[in-house]
Amino acid sequence: RLWHQPLKHREWNGTGSTAHFQDIFLGRCYIYTQLVQPEFRPYHMQHTFETKLLIFTSHVLSLRDRDCKKIEEAFRNAFISKDPCEVTEEDYHPLMELASQTVPCDKTVFWSRTKELAHQYTWVRQEMFTLENTLLGYVADGLTWCGDSGSSEMNYQSCPDWRKDCKNNSVTVFWKVLSKMFAENACGMVQVVLNGSLSNAFSKDSTFGGVEVHNLHPEKVHTLQAWVMHDIGKSPSDSCSGSSIMDLKSIMSKRNIKFTCQDNYR
Ligand code: NAD
């Protein structure tokens, strides 16, 4: 009866792949590439008729001909049948090539520990883009995925936790590669929304501080504009004059990129 038993996957400390992963991935891909219209406004992607014409004719509409099935296949190929702790950046390169997308200059928004606020902002300023407003960021946001060496199935029971199991796991490596590419492609003035209700609004260990900041190209990006926002009703723990922002300022000055900072921009 052995062959009737489901294959036993390796056990990890993190939650398993999101149920119906493939359907969600494909569904989100079709929403992004086919349904971005004024009458249909998925989460994070509201557009007025004007901005739709201005931005989306050149950027999202050019994605209409992207083949979501091919993108999903390239995504799966990056991690399926592999040890989920030994996924490399190169594994995701074919996917990145297939789904690359450019954001107009002056419209890139980074964030760190301010996910909700940053997205509320790009929801209102519809011409601005966070990573999650681009195709790959949109399809993968909030999902978990991992494979297993010796099986062509995804592991829905458990996936590696990036603190307890390993850093080079399928999810962490994906966000690292995607964040790197997002920063490399940025141009003009770029923005970051930071959290002034934390003791360190800027952290070198975050994806923003460890990956994005170091992959901005000084030939293309002239200014990084930071907003340090704190929770309404709470007294701020960090601000533009705090030491963590001074660290960011000095990194930017060494990188030859102008730095400006504003506390609680309205
Ligand atoms: P953050 O600390 O708020 O982290 C953002 C999310 O990524 C959190 O859910 C966090 O748990 C997770 N995360 C962070 N580092 C991780 C890692 N090494 N492995 C697995 N998960 C990790 O802010 P951050 O780290 O500065 O990342 C935000 C910036 O990086 C944004 O500018 C965005 O472009 C990009 N990013 C987005 C996501 C996402 O889930 N949408 C994840 C990582 C990075």
Image (spheres, rainbow, N blue to C red):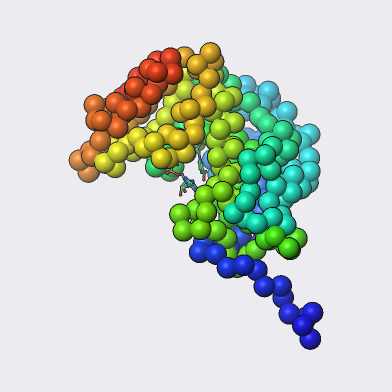
**Can you say whether 35 is above or below 149 in the image?**
above
Q: Residue furthest bottom?
A: 1
Q: Which residue is painted at 58% across and 68% down in the image?
A: 11
Q: Which residue is painted at 44% across and 18% down in the image?
A: 255
Residue in the foreground of this view, choosing between 134 and 52: 134
Residue in the foreground of this view, choosing between 135 and 158: 158
Q: Which residue is painted at 59% across and 40% down in the image?
A: 137
Q: Is residue 230 shown left or right of residue 178?
A: left
Q: How many marks?
A: 0
**Can you say whether 168 is above or below 209 in the image?**
below
Counting from the top left corner in percent of width and height, residue 159 is at: 57, 60
Q: Quadrant of the C terminus?
A: top left
Q: Which residue is painted at 58% across and 44% down in the image?
A: 173
Counting from the top left corner in percent of width and height, residue 73 is at: 76, 48
**Can you say whether 165 is above or below 137 in the image?**
below
Is residue 105 visible in the rendered image? The answer is: yes
Is residue 47 visible in the rendered image? The answer is: no
Q: Residue furthest left?
A: 235
Residue in the foreground of this view, choosing between 4 and 166: 166
Q: Quadrant of residue 6?
A: bottom right
Counting from the top left corner in percent of width and height, residue 202 is at: 35, 35
Q: Quadrant of the N terminus?
A: bottom right
Counting from the top left corner in percent of width and height, residue 261 is at: 33, 23
**Can you say whether 12 is above or below 126 in the image?**
below
